[in-house]
Amino acid sequence: MKHVKEHEVKGDRFDPPHARTIKHLATPWPSGTRNIWMGVTKVDPGNSSNLHSHEDMEEIFYVVSGHGRIRVGEEGEAVEPGSCIYLPIGSPHELINTGDETLKVVAAASPPFSLDSFGAVHKGQE
């Protein structure tokens, strides 16, 4: 069994205009997952994730707290706590925090990222 506590994970920090922290909770490194990656993204107010896609994986977002928008391809919708969004393989997507508090989203991707592939697509620039 692997037990990870979010508050003990440092995470990757990105600068504005994509100011956010991404914490890896269940990953091939070091958790040993083989079929899934799970993490938490915290997007600062007035910021967004970089627009990116995953050419070989699908992803699901679940909004825990905060308010914002999700852009998937040409579509965009408001998100709030309890929103669950499915991202098909290869779909460009971006989380946008439109509120005045941190937008916290749990994400799961399958197949999982490698550490190198994660860094390549989640950098702070488009």
Image (tube, helix red, strand yellow):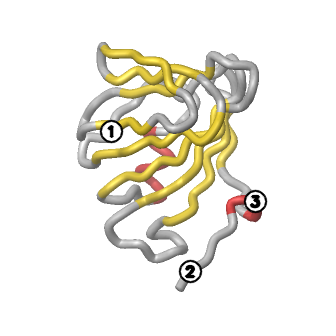
Query: Does residue 114 sit above or below 54 in this rendering?
Result: below
How far apart marks 3 and 1 lie (CA) works out to 26 Å
Element marked by disc 3: helix
Place residue 6 in its image quadrant: bottom right
Q: Which mark is residue 86?
A: 1
How many residues crowd mark 3 within 10 Å: few (<14), some (14–19), many (20+)? few
**Sequence-wise, which precedes: disc 3 or disc 2?**
2
Indicate which label's residue lies in the foreground, 1 or 2.
Answer: 1
* Badge 2 amino acid: Lys
How many residues crowd mark 2 within 10 Å: few (<14), some (14–19), many (20+)? few
Element marked by disc 2: loop
| Residue 119 horizontal side relative to residue 71, left or right | right
**Sequence-wise, which precedes: disc 3 or disc 1?**
3
How far apart marks 1 and 2 lie (CA) works out to 26 Å
Q: Position of residue 89 (x, y in %)?
A: 24, 40
Query: Does residue 51 sit above or below 83 in this rendering?
Result: above
Element marked by disc 1: strand
Q: Which residue is mark 3?
A: 7
Residue shown at the point (57%, 35%) measured from the top left: 81
Q: Position of residue 85 (x, y in %)?
A: 38, 36
Q: Which residue is mark 2?
A: 2
| Residue 90 horizontal side relative to residue 27, left or right | left
Comparing 82 with 26, the one in front is 82
Residues under numbered marks 3 and 2 in contact, where contact means CB atoms less than 8 Å apart: no
